[in-house]
Image (cartoon, grey):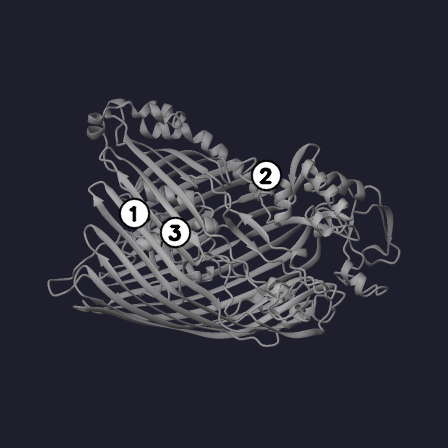
Amino acid sequence: MLLNKMIIACLKTAFVFSLPFFANHMNTPKLTACLLGMLCVAAARSQSTRQLRRDTLPAPDTLQAELKEQLQEQIPVISLDDNELKSDGQNQVASLLGAGRDPFYNAASFNFSAAHFRIRGYDGDAFKVLLNGAPVENPDNGLPAYNLFSGLSGVLRNRSLITGLKANAYTAFAMGSTTAIDARASRMQPQTTVQMGIASSNYRYSMSAAYSSGLNSRGWAWAIAGSIRWANEGYVPGTFYHGGSYLLSVDKRLSPHHLFSLAVIGAPVTRARAGAAVAEMQQLAGSVYYNPYWGYQNGVKRSAAISETHRPYVVATHTFTVNAQTELTTAWWYTGGNSSSTGLDWYNAPDPRPDYYRYLPGYIKDEAQQNQLAAALLGNEAMRQINWAELYAVNRTDSTTIHHANGFDTATASGYRSHYILSRNTSHMRQTGFNSTLRTRINEQVELNGGLSYEQQTVRYYKTIADLLGGDFYVDLNQYAEQDFPGNADAIQNDLRHPNRIVHTGDKYGYDYAMQVSKAAGWLQVAATQRHVDWFMAAGFSSTSFGRTGYVTNGLFPYNSYGKSNRYSFSDYALRAGATYKINGRHYVYANGALYTQAPYYNNVFISPATRNTVQQQIAAAKIQSAEAGYILNAPRIRLRLNMYYTRSSNGMDVLSFYHDDYRSFVNYALRNISKLYYGSELGVEAKVLPNVTANAAAAIGKYLYAGRQHATITLDNSTKVLDEQTVYLQNYRIGGSPQQVLCAGITYRSPAYWFAGFTCNYMSDQWLEANPIRRTFAATEDLAYKNTQWHAVVDQQRLQAQYLLNCTAGYSWRLPWQWGFKKPVYLVWFAGINNLLNNKQMVSGGYEQLRFDYTDKNVNKFPPKLLYAYGTTFLLNVSLRF
């Protein structure tokens, strides 16, 4: 946290001292006045329409697109290239290049984000992101690290997007899309931008500045950018946000054939999280934004759930232009840093969470006591939140002496022993690798693409004491092992090499292990452009291996926790092919297909990596088959794409850990044979209905299902013994987390006076909570009459209500008059957006069925679902100077 605070403070200081620099850069003091008064935009509109048309030039970019990116910085960004139709000659029909400003992806990238819509229902690892040729992804789940680009959308606008299964010049292993971000300084438009903004969602205020020089006569180019965003309290009570971002990019062109680039990018963020909650607590709090993660301490809100992330990337790129037909790009990268989150931990003490199910009125059977507790919770906010004062009081009452401290027979530790602490779970990542891609045109019709890559990464996971909460020390013992193995002094030790270890603030405790992963890959693609047909074929091969290294000897698993585990290796392939039939220069039909295998992630193979090296009984790579076909219209006044897709995956794996009420212990629920099916259609339309009016519409109608029964192996977290083997009856249940039917329609007016305004109406439905596999087993429904009310309550999946949203955006660009003394064009730009204009607060944006289940009474309301709701009306207003 201290490092993040220092970086953000440095960024704030840099912005303050940069104002005179920007004024000197323009050689006029009037720019300083503009910088200090940017938020008073109304004064700039005093010019007449005649003056505006004389002084204003069209902006070189699209304000609306930039606004949308800033509105969705908390979610994955999908951006599109403005590719145009080109012809290689009279005998050729224009080929469809890239995304062609795909109208469906334009809508899906922003309009459906409030409901966490996933394109085609795919998991995040199906979407790849490259930065100057280097992959940007999290090692444990393959998800792109989108947070790395937060606050930098203005300078990271040179991008190429390959959607679906189309021919891909960057990789053969992406099923959803590939976004290649070009952050080389020589490719950026020479420009200086200073921006300020206010918002009402995760953060309240923002400032950013960016400068790019362009390539000078000596072959150098450089770009620098930074931003800060902060809120002492966000939209949800008890949350805050302190974030920054930075980019430094330097290019050196040695000759027309060689360009060397270096880019450093990072985004330190510290934030207090909001937690999902059961409906009972939301009703007692009178708000769907009830957050159980905070409480009052000395009259000030304090959160127990604080996340910190800072993992900068360093990418060195060499672009070798052999000739006009061949280019070789090689990127070397290194990334490292921490991601951590805090939470309450306790030892031999009552559960401190305010929404613990035993503390809720619904748990009490006596109606009078139930009503009394409900009335108390309803009238006292402090009772619904963490009681920090009580935690401190408990820790200051247990004055004790620990004998045989730290494994020494004669050593003791005396003082106040903490029973409640604030823990910090940390993952420290180090990753390095290279990626080399070749593009060469064999002749006028055939292009060859290929690539080789290798990456190696180590992620170390450990837990430390963040705060002793008034106590003097904490003892590193396993309280659950103490319950299961009473009297066994070895079993209760988290680290047998340091028994009875006394830990203080900042010390490690509990677990400490690392996962090492290495991956090598190669691929080749041939693409041909002919008179009426474009086609491609691609093949790829990859080799992945991973293993675990334990740094503590767990008392329950003394021979299977410390040191290196076995190494697990997988060889995978990717085959892709497709063709586009060009009816003419406006009408196209296409079909693409792919076959993949994909190695599992280590978190789905190791059953309990925090304690031991044990893995699932059967380990296999997933198999994926996918196909798509569609029709595209690219006409001067209308763009349309209709697409149908079908994807099936099998041999998936997962591991769930939770408290099992039937076994009265924490268990590991290892799932295998997970099959999924995704199919549906997508439609996107964008039409210029009037010279200055554009209408657009998009729709996605799909079904995302589990395609077969799964197998579960249940083990206690404190034992390697297999407790049970179960069949999970999830076939034809919906995959949760994303609406499966979405519709949107919008209209945008662009004035000749350089302002625009747009409205979009969105409808999202067919969204389901992710099904708890434990409830879909024979053990969960045993003794229930088939298809009676209680049976349906246990096995039926919860479908969420359909929802609607109305969003609006607006922007304006004004070129400051030459009479003010500027030596180059200077633009004052403002843009604003309002999300959820009708203040719909009933949209569930996330949630899950609790994994705990009442096996005794089969009462699903004992552990009801926990939900998160989308924000009501929020706004964003940004004002910037560009010159």
In this picture, residue 47 sits left or right of residue 234: left
The image quarter in which residue 635 lies: bottom left
Of the residues under marks 2 and 3, which one precedes in the sequence?
3
Q: Name the residue under label 1.
A: 219
Q: Residue 785: horizontal and vertical position, in percent?
A: 65, 70
The image quarter in which residue 658 lies: bottom right
In this picture, residue 158 sits left or right of residue 139: left
Q: Residues within 10 Å of mark 3 (few under 14, many from 20)?
A: many
Work out how far the residue at label 1 is from the one at label 3, CA to CA, in angstroms: 37 Å
Task: Name the kind of residue labelled 1 in the image.
Answer: Gly
- Numbered mark located on residue 237 in the image: 2
Q: Residue 741: horizontal and vertical position, in percent?
A: 41, 57
Q: Residue 776: horizontal and vertical position, in percent?
A: 60, 68
Of the residues under marks 1 and 3, which one precedes in the sequence?
3
Mark 2 and mark 1 in contact (Cβ < 8 Å)? no
State the SS at label 3: loop
